[in-house]
Amino acid sequence: MSTIRVTIWNEFIHEREHAVVTQIYPRGIHAVVADALREHAGDALAIRTATFDEPEHGLSDAVLAETDVLTWWGHAAHDRVSDAVVDRVQQRVLEGMGLLVMHSGHASKIFRRLMGTSCMLRWREAAERERLWIVNPSHPIAAGLTGEFFELPHTEMYGEFFDIPVPDELIFISWFEGGEVFRSGCTFRRGKGKIFYFRPGHETFPIYYDANVRRVLANAVAWLAPTGSAYFGNGRNITPSLSPISSRHIVDESLHRPK
Amino acid sequence: MSTIRVTIWNEFIHEREHAVVTQIYPRGIHAVVADALREHAGDALAIRTATFDEPEHGLSDAVLAETDVLTWWGHAAHDRVSDAVVDRVQQRVLEGMGLLVMHSGHASKIFRRLMGTSCMLRWREAAERERLWIVNPSHPIAAGLTGEFFELPHTEMYGEFFDIPVPDELIFISWFEGGEVFRSGCTFRRGKGKIFYFRPGHETFPIYYDANVRRVLANAVAWLAPTGSAYFGNGRNITPSLSPISSRHIVDESLHRPK
Amino acid sequence: MSTIRVTIWNEFIHEREHAVVTQIYPRGIHAVVADALREHAGDALAIRTATFDEPEHGLSDAVLAETDVLTWWGHAAHDRVSDAVVDRVQQRVLEGMGLLVMHSGHASKIFRRLMGTSCMLRWREAAERERLWIVNPSHPIAAGLTGEFFELPHTEMYGEFFDIPVPDELIFISWFEGGEVFRSGCTFRRGKGKIFYFRPGHETFPIYYDANVRRVLANAVAWLAPTGSAYFGNGRNITPSLSPISSRHIVDESLHRPK
Amino acid sequence: MSTIRVTIWNEFIHEREHAVVTQIYPRGIHAVVADALREHAGDALAIRTATFDEPEHGLSDAVLAETDVLTWWGHAAHDRVSDAVVDRVQQRVLEGMGLLVMHSGHASKIFRRLMGTSCMLRWREAAERERLWIVNPSHPIAAGLTGEFFELPHTEMYGEFFDIPVPDELIFISWFEGGEVFRSGCTFRRGKGKIFYFRPGHETFPIYYDANVRRVLANAVAWLAPTGSAYFGNGRNITPSLSPISSRHIVDESLHRPK
């Protein structure tokens, strides 16, 4: 298996502005996500990171051309992400780049662009318990999970209705102590690219230190890596035809009249 | 059953510029689509039409607010459709308005917006034979079709790969004389709105006079009419919670530290 | 719209053997389900009932031939249902009869036959609270529901993993007070028939008196009624072909040799 | 990656009874399928074969317990396959064994058992051309295919309506010279097991010598190999609950009365 080139994108704003977040993620969420991926699949990955403040948000054509899987964490600056960069990321997804959208990334421009919907949801910050139940046990993204569910003791709640298209595959459904459910692990295909939305990850809880979350992130990156055939999403005229067509069709003007 | 308010949108350019099209659709494609709908479901429908040249393309807020199902035929002017109108139509779909996208409408801004993909495909103009095979016989959009397939003797070909998300439901697969296949009848849900893409309809052939095509158009409008529950696509904070949450969670600062 | 002929099948054992059940359903669960359907769609339905103790469980060829939608409630006698009747019901579903499987019917022979899986799940009887969240707001089975969820104050719990094929459509996800989630409203297509599994309904709680549950049952019966095209599930040889095939193919023996 | 243990099951009747088949597959179809898998993934596979005439059709409990992926080719003896073996294979699929069903295996007991439908289709033996178009280019089963389609010059035709449940994933759609289309590459999940149906393979044409077909078979076996979490398809009572339930619920008899 060849190396998967991963670019971990993080807004990297909360970590520098809020003490509670700095305490959890002193080097930024991206650094901890990178650790998680290395822990599970170090040899198979070539990891780089990129953040909002870099030129072109760190996502130049050159960087994206060398990216097999892009992970996305954003929250405070969704509206300030450049449309040109969003166009570029969308195009790369259609061409086959995998995209892992994490937690508050649900409201990012790129996720909304690829979904066509509002991607909005209900939420609550009450440090409540979450259980992620596995509903697709044969999916590689669930590999290595040993129980029927895994649990996060204190999380921000996300609840339905989650305004997304029907997922191609639904892997996790969350239960929340306060009374809600959520489709927490969803796959989508767009063009030749695969997308995985994974709910856990609020910045004020140490979610990305959780062993099960880390495993799912690593599984997801492996699943998102490009595979399959070539991309055929650019239209073209196919003339002449592959198989013969009765020649009278083309010249008979009466075909172009209602009966 | 209450009346379904249908707005038939047509670009209405080819019919005024090309003699072969004028001959088939002298009053415009929209007029013939309206006839088709009236033929099958006259009493249940309140039909209006709108075209590209009208102010706001005939799709003002007021018109859309009174529209249950919008049908879309465009080809020559996709790029000139106003983004503000596309925003507005997308929002109405999310709120529940049905959308019937016809033939070359696959490349319209509104369809691409709702799909998140290029929506491109292969094509050929060779007046060739098409057979639409039914692969979802219990779907109401196939109601009243009596054979395993129906046939159009002379059509423009559309072939795979059709760069759309995986359809929620696949109803028709086309066979073309020249060697291609196509997913010709596809449903999608976005927000509270339903979408049906239906392939047949090239402007230089009298497709919208075909009895089976007309039946499918009428079935589709009935299926696309709003139903279901209320729309919940606008996010909101749900505090306090529906069910009790252990109060210690909220005050314990140690929750916000990695272990 | 023509009349929908509904046959409500109920095992009708618990109601005659357990006082707590008799108290809730003195005339049997089937009688209360019939009331629920009549309440919402009386004029559109022709309702009959059938129970386990009747000859052929009340499901003779003649009865099934006159049934558009069959509803199924069973629990204690799954194993004693005749295989011949199961064969017959399966065949009628493939031909287009709708099937509404309720609550403990998940473990019935007919549901397992149509699903191909164990259809097993987790459960608990603790009179706990259930909230059914709507995740497919445009589906006609959710019609008329006004909130984001509806609630049952005391229910038997069913929890994931629910061993079913991936549903064609997922309409409700349940939250349970004790910590589980469940895919509580699922549609499936088999042959030309449609199937809806609806979780609520334990015999020791008065679930089928709940207004929202009754509405969903009525919506489901309307959605399950046969529609679409003819059924094409019986194989056949199509010779000669619809379109010409190069005649050399058939006579050239070399085609039948590996190169 | 650990070794995948593959059992290639072949009826092995036609090859011994019909000269034209003997000529193509002198050692049996299973031997050529084994060659195909070895060609692409030799080191990663441990291959054994089993045939109809062996005791228990070669599919004892012991063999199945050591099988990660089972491939199935049958035609003449579907009805004579032992129900006990079918039960056993189904159970192993639910527990996670992958199943590759090939060509005429569509009518096998095991495929029909897992689908719940007739699995019938249209057919014709006219040595006609087939093109398999890729409609899911990011799927690993399409890996390494370089064109938009691949072609088989002479095949038995299988046409729609193919009476299967809606596939979880549709990868190939076939075009046939004589006028039909077919869903030729379909995935399904049942329990923890994955299933792939692949159409090509008639015994009187040398289909399993085709390079693209061989590649797809090898891709499919890799995709079918067990992964994911543990299997949770055996029901159980979860008492006490994971999260607290109001104790009054359990003792209040009024809960068990309709209001």
Image (tube, coloured by chain):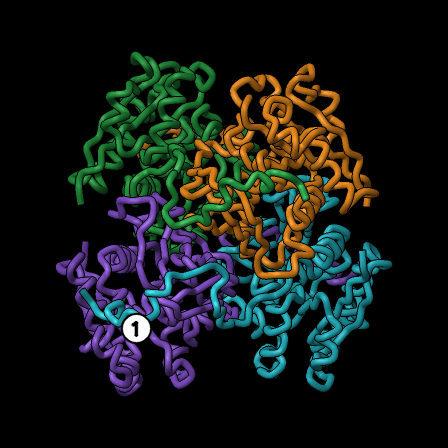
Chain colours: A green, B orange, C cyan, D purple
State the image quarter where residue D61 is shown: bottom left
State the image quarter where residue D223 is shown: bottom left
Label tally: 1
SS class of the residue under badge 1? loop
Query: Is D59 positioned to the left or the right of A111 in the image?
Result: left
- Which residue occupies 38% across, 38% down? A239
Percent of width and height locating residue D138: 34, 43
Nearer to us in this view, D208 or B245: D208
On the question of residue B58 being in view, the answer is: yes
On the question of residue D100 being in view, the answer is: no
- Which residue occupies 30% across, 73% down? D204
Nearer to us in this view, B116 or C251: C251
Nearer to us in this view, B221 or C141: B221
Query: Is C20 positioned to the left or the right of A100 in the image?
Result: right
Q: Quadrant of the C terminus of chain D?
A: bottom right
A14 up-or-down from C184: above or below: above
Chain letter of the residue carrying label 1? D
C220 up-or-down from A175: above or below: below
Percent of width and height locating residue A152: 42, 41
- Which residue occupies 37% across, 77% down? D75
- Which residue occupies 64% across, 59% down? C229
| Type of amino acid under label 1 | Thr
Q: How crowded is mark 1: few (under 14 residues within 10 Å), some or many (20 or more)?
A: many
Percent of width and height locating residue D21: 26, 77
Q: Name the residue under label 1.
A: D204
